[in-house]
Amino acid sequence: MAQIFNDENFEKEVLKSDIPVLVDFFAEWCGPCKMMGPVIEKLAEEYEGKWKIGKIDVDQSPKTSMEYSVQSIPTLLFFKDGKVVDMSVGFQAKEKIVAKLV
């Protein structure tokens, strides 16, 4: 199951994670975000232990969203060692995301 990130736990769960992290910036009202949800859940299952995969609601965590200049959603940020190493904006097919998880 995808983890839930927020302004309070972002540093601990994402920036200080021992393994790479994929963060899905989303909002409940966003159509493409709803389409992305099942893809993120499936990846969280398949990559458990290799990647930490979770979601952050931009409406509930505006500080983190602004810090990473998230202007469109869904936005996927890929973190390694606390730094953004890749990003995708808009709905992404599972295969495209998997290609970035190597």
Image (cartoon, rainbow, N blue to C red):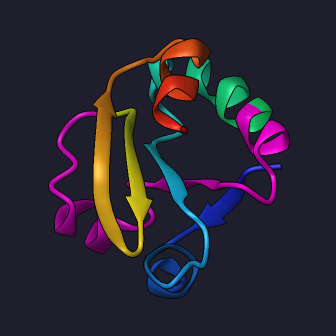
Q: Give me the residue at 44% from left, 84% from top.
A: 11
Residue appearing at x 32%, y 31% in the figure: 88
Q: Which is more toward the observer, 47 or 53? A: 47
Q: Which residues are magenta?
A: 43-72
- The image quarter in which residue 86 lies: top left
| 100 versus 52 height, above or below | above
Q: How many marks?
A: 0
Residue at image position (62%, 54%) is: 54
Query: Residue, x 60% and y 17% (percent of image)?
Result: 94
Q: Nearer the viewer, residue 15 or 8?
A: 15
Q: Quadrant of residue 38?
A: top right
Q: Nearer the viewer, residue 8 or 12?
A: 12
Residue 73 horizontal/vertical position (percent): 33, 34
Q: Is residue 82 magenta?
A: no
On the image, the x and y values in percent for residue 45 come to 84, 41
* Residue 69 magenta-highlighted: yes
Q: Position of residue 51 (x, y in %)?
A: 65, 55
| Above or below for 41 versus 32 | below
- Please identify the quadrant where the C terminus is shown: top right
Q: In the current view of this chain or complex, which residue is farthest to the front?
A: 102
Question: Vertically, is 96 above or below 53?
Answer: above
